[in-house]
Image (spheres, grey):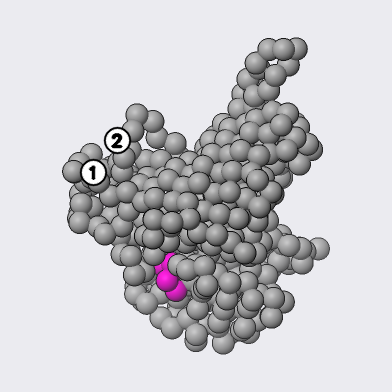
């Protein structure tokens, strides 16, 4: 039988209000009973809009963690604090959903994995693009063997002029980077997940900051975009231990004729290939000596992705996470997988800084 899951929210800013809290509110079993933010007014507002009638408000997350009735914590803070808060929550006996990326550094991500192992608590990361219909269909198609051996992939997160300039997005100390760690992280996670390959051998990457007027035409306005120290764009080659290769391209600002939203990837296999974008999935293959391309109708019936498949990826992510807690099953995004994403992202930055490839043991 189903039961209630008592949840504490740490960080009541944009991602909490735009994704997590509205999604959790739609799940009957999910009860948000505590809200924490260093700006008390944000926590108060969140409690009023999304909390239970007796929801508590905190400005110190460590005080929240003392509440033994809280079973799950959502860590929705800037990247720098993901690791410390998550580790504290795990050791306080809570299951944790941490927003992407897993951490600011690969070392912090490893510490989070170890804490989950030590405590036996569930830890997952907010990579919601795994939960969209195109990704779920592609995953089942690949796992069935229809692509054969997947040996070549592209992952994309390309904006023409879309540099976020609110909150701490432009703060390198808090976030750890620009589009690589902000949006390419989604695309790389989805690519590795669909390939089911988490063993990188080598990364060669290069970041770019060369536009004369990166603030011009920015969809969110100027607000200091041209003064950010972070990269505007980047590309990388990732070679996996089995010989498969991944080409990564990402940008917040780039003079390009086509934007490709984060969470997009192309996979090429020995039997067929496919391209996943936001709301579309195209499968290509050779059939009767002809090149065939098929656009999958993701709005039709057929494969049962999940009960209530019309929900958004964020809502599906929340539903599957709460079900994993209730039924004591593994979450869709495992911490060990997310840690590899962080390791590769960090290697791209390091490779760009040194001008040399980064090799994995």
Which structural element holds mark 1?
loop
Q: How many marks?
A: 2
Name the residue rendered at 55%, 75% in the picture: 86
The extreme front residue here reads 356
Q: Residues within 10 Å of mark 2 (few under 14, many from 20)?
A: few
Is 227 covered by the magenta stretch? no
Residue assigned mark 1: 211
Q: Work out whether residue 52 or residue 128 is closer to the camera in this orientation and state it.
A: 128
The answer to whether the residue labelled 2 contacts the one labelled 1, judged by CB atoms less than 8 Å apart, is yes
Residue 4 point in image, percent of width and height? 68, 68
Residue assigned mark 2: 255
Name the residue rendered at 35%, 47% in the picture: 233
Q: Residues within 10 Å of mark 1 (few under 14, many from 20)?
A: some
Label ID, residue 253: none
> Residue 250, relative to residue 348: is it above or below?
above
Q: Earlier in the sequence, mark 2 or mark 1?
A: 1
Which structural element holds mark 2?
loop
- Quadrant of the image containing the C terminus: bottom right
Residue stretch rendered in magenta on the structure: 77-81
28 vs 357, left or right, is right
> Residue 120, relative to residue 78: is it above or below?
below
Alpha-carbon span between mark 2 and mark 1: 8 Å
Name the residue rendered at 45%, 67% in the picture: 104
Residue 283 point in image, percent of width and height? 64, 27
Name the magenta segment's main secondary structure.
helix
- Quadrant of the image containing the N terminus: bottom right
Residue 126 point in image, percent of width and height? 55, 58
Residue 11 point in image, percent of width and height? 44, 70
**Residue 179 visible, this orientation:** no
Q: Work out whether residue 205 or residue 146 is closer to the camera in this orientation and state it.
A: 205
Name the residue rendered at 53%, 35% in the picture: 277
């Amino acid at each position: 039988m189903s039961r209630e899951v008592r949840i504490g929210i740490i960080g009541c800013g944009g991602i909490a209000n735009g994704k997590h809290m509205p999604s959790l509110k739609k799940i009957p079993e999910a009860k948000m009973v505590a809200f924490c933010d260093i700006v008390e007014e944000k926590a108060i507002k969140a409690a009023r809009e999304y909390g239970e009638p007796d929801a508590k408000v905190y400005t110190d997350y460590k005080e929240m963690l003392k509440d033994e009735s809280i079973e799950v914590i959502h860590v929705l803070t800037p990247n720098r604090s993901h690791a410390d808060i998550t580790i504290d929550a795990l050791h306080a006996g809570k299951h944790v959903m941490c927003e992407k990326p897993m951490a600011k550094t690969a070392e912090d991500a490893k510490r989070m994995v170890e804490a989950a192992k030590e405590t036996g608590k569930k830890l997952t990361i907010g990579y919601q693009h795994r939960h969209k219909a195109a990704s779920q269909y592609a995953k089942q198609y690949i796992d069935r063997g229809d692509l054969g051996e997947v040996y070549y992939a592209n992952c994309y997160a390309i904006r023409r002029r879309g540099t976020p300039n609110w909150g701490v997005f432009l703060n390198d100390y808090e976030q750890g980077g620009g589009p690589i760690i902000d949006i390419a992280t989604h695309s790389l996670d989805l690519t590795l997940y669909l390939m089911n390959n988490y063993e990188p051998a080598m990364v060669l990457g290069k970041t770019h900051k060369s536009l004369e007027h990166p603030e011009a035409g920015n969809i969110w306005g100027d607000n200091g975009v041209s003064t950010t120290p972070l990269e505007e764009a980047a590309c990388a080659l990732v070679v996996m231990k089995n010989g498969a290769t991944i080409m990564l391209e990402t940008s917040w600002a780039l003079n390009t004729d086509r934007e490709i939203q984060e969470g997009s990837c192309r996979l090429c296999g020995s039997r067929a290939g496919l391209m996943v974008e936001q709301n579309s999935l195209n499968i290509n293959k050779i059939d009767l000596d002809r090149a065939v391309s098929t656009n999958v109708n993701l709005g039709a019936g057929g494969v049962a992705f999940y009960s209530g498949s019309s929900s958004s990826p964020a809502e599906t992510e929340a539903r599957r996470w709460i079900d994993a807690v209730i039924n004591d099953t593994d979450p869709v995004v495992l911490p060990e997988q997310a840690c590899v994403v962080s390791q590769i992202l960090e290697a791209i930055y390091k490779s760009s800084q040194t001008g040399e490839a980064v090799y994995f043991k």
